[in-house]
Image (cartoon, rainbow, N blue to C red):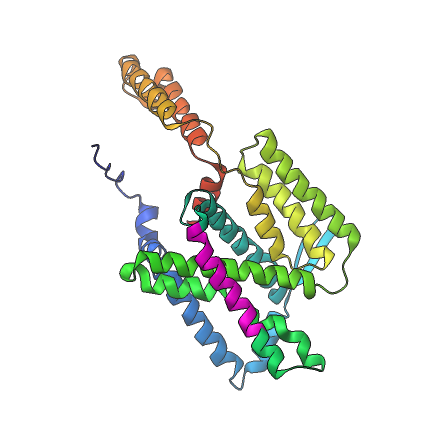
Amino acid sequence: MAGTLPPLELPPTRWERLLAPWTRFVQHEASSGALLLSATALALAWANSPWGESYARLWETKVRLGVGEVEMALSLHHLVNDGLMAIFFFLVGLEIKRELLVGELASPRRAALPIAAALGGMLVPAAIYVLFNPSGPERRGWGVPMATDIAFSLGILALVGRGGPPSLRIFLAALAIVDDLGAVLVIAIFYAGKLDMTALAMAAGAFGLLLLANRLGARHPAVYAVLALALWAAVFGSGVHATVAGVLAALAVPARTRVDTDEVLHRGRALLDAFDAAGEEGPNVVTNRGQQAALEGLERLTEAALTPLQRMERALHT
């Protein structure tokens, strides 16, 4: 049985040594949870302090994004709520798609429990809310208690780190993801307000192009990034919560490899042999055409063996 290869360790550059403390903090599993809770505590203290009005004004600061004559003005609140959260939901969508295809949710029996728990976590709070608010304008807020804040759920899981049982962490993560996706659908259906049908049609077209790109075999992340941005702009303009665009874009990202394990082994060994044989042309890889060709072949083979879903998920995690 083959052993696990040790990670490739290279002498750090000066730049890497300069960033080493920050890199260690970011790569630590609990750092994201600690940062989230610290920022929350700071925001609560600021909002409830004598300077609370400045906190509210900060989130109304306008940010303008534009190219040429086309311009979009967003407050910081909307930039985070509709922009950054759409990226977050895109990442969550990639993770849930992976889990549904090859992970802990691939089996219907395994997926049933967190899905049932998530449905209970949405329906029971909504029922309790309606019980205490049976009439009047307050009743319309029944969807508010349905959502589990996925950022806090995953942040607390990150704080626990590897100390908790892996099965518990997977269950809670799946529950939070399904619950929050359900809440997004509730927002889209019941709280969207007046919808712009033209923008919705454009969103449907952008989503159709994403699915077509997947069907035609497009694998470059830039293709999906451009179409996902168009989808986000259309969803945002339609009146539907923009995080829906993140989930839809994730569903369209290809999750299949172009080569199987046997082909990777066969071609990889052939390319490594070619790299070794070309060493007689010269000791420097930069000037050795044979070794350069072998390395480029290995790079293409690696890209074919990794799915676009894996590459995008890894890029967003780093």
x 40%, y 61%: residue: 32
Horizontal and vertical percent for residue 252?
Answer: 58, 42
Q: Determine if residue 69 is in view.
A: no
Question: Which secondary structure dominates the residues rendered in magenta?
Answer: helix
Q: Quadrant of the N terminus?
A: top left
Quadrant of the rendered image containing residue 52:
bottom right
Q: Which residues are magenta?
A: 109-126
Q: 47 left or right of 104?
A: right
**In the foreground, 17 or 74:** 74
Horizontal and vertical percent for residue 189?
Answer: 68, 61
Would you place residue 256 above or below residue 105 in this image? above
x 63%, y 68%: residue: 61
Horizontal and vertical percent for residue 25?
Answer: 33, 58
Farthest-out residue, bottom = 50
Would you place residue 96 above or below residue 219 in this image? below
Would you place residue 258 above or below residue 199 in this image? above
x 46%, y 55%: residue: 112
Horizontal and vertical percent for residue 185?
Answer: 62, 59
Would you place residue 188 above or below residue 283 in this image? below
Q: Determine if residue 138 is in view.
A: yes
Q: 151 left or right of 283?
A: right
Whether the magenta-drawn stretch holds residue 309 is answered as no
